[in-house]
Amino acid sequence: MADEFNFDWQRAARTGIAEAVLCSDKSQAHVADIVARVQDRRESLLLTRLSSETAEFLAAEHTNIDWHEVSATAFVDNGIEQPVDSNCVIVTAGTSDMSVAEEARRTLLFNGLNVPVLPDCGVAGLWRLTDQLPVLSKAPVIIAVAGMEGALFSVLAGLVPGLVIAVPGSTGYGVAEGGHAALHSALATCAPGVVVVNIDNGFGAACSMLKILSQLSMSTEK
């Protein structure tokens, strides 16, 4: 089974984003084999879309598995760097979007950045969003997660100077089921400064934020 995967240990040095493993559709034995290889090298690894059953199985064998239930992520921690606080923000339309937001937050944390989450700021109660404008207006990059009709993306981008990374959430029902209505709203927004990742892709949104911040840092150092 060891021949079925090939780690990209140089990814962080090459791209600024550490290696990660998507665990959905992998057997428990396959994930365990991956973790064993990581442990042998004393490397750290981010596991995403990890089931609670597989997480419990791994934790029984390894003491350095940091499992987070809401995000369905785990860290194999062999010396993860201490994160630094960021003025970037993750914001959600509702509490149903928290699993995606937490996947983004944990991905950022694994890569050394501590980004807070502002939950339940959907536009059905617009005051919930406007109350957070003092924080949101200072953020150079914002990850916004919203299901249903995805109205948060346009409203937020029309209020703040920072870049909005829209993550359509699969929460919703009827025509909003599966996140496609939110995806179309994000893609069709007339508010400038919105970029879009795939439905429920908190990991991808976090990686986009990391790359943007890295380039901003490089430009200010020149």
Image: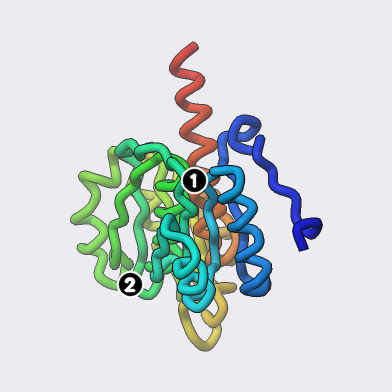
10 Å crowding of disc 2: few (<14), some (14-19), many (20+): some
List x then y, in percent, for residue 51: 52, 74
10 Å crowding of disc 1: few (<14), some (14-19), many (20+): few
Relative to 14, residue 203 above or below: below
Q: In this view, does 160 lie to the left or right of 11?
A: left
Taking the spot 38% from the left edge, 75% from the top edge, the residue there is: 96
For numbered disc 1, what is the local secondary structure? loop
Viewer-proximal residue, 127 or 38?
A: 38
As drawn, the residue found furthest toward the top would be: 222
List x then y, in percent, for residue 42: 54, 43
- Res 102 quadrant in image: bottom left
- Of marks 1 and 2, the one in the foreground: 2
How many dots with numbers? 2
Residue 156: image tag: none
Viewer-proximal residue, 138 or 70?
A: 70
Q: In this view, does 81 lie to the left or right of 27?
A: left
- Amino acid at pointer 2: Thr
Relative to 129, residue 97 above or below: below
Taking the spot 62% from the left edge, 34% from the top edge, the residue there is: 15
Q: Residue under label 2, please give it.
A: 95
Viewer-proximal residue, 8 or 31?
A: 31
- Amino acid at pointer 1: Pro
Q: How far apart are the two marked residues, 1 and 2, measured between alpha carbons?
A: 26 Å
Taking the spot 65% from the left edge, 40% from the top edge, the residue there is: 9
In the picture, the quarter occupied by the N terminus is bottom right
Q: Is residue 187 visible?
A: yes
Residue 192: image tag: 1
Earlier along the polypeptide chain: callout 1 or callout 2?
2
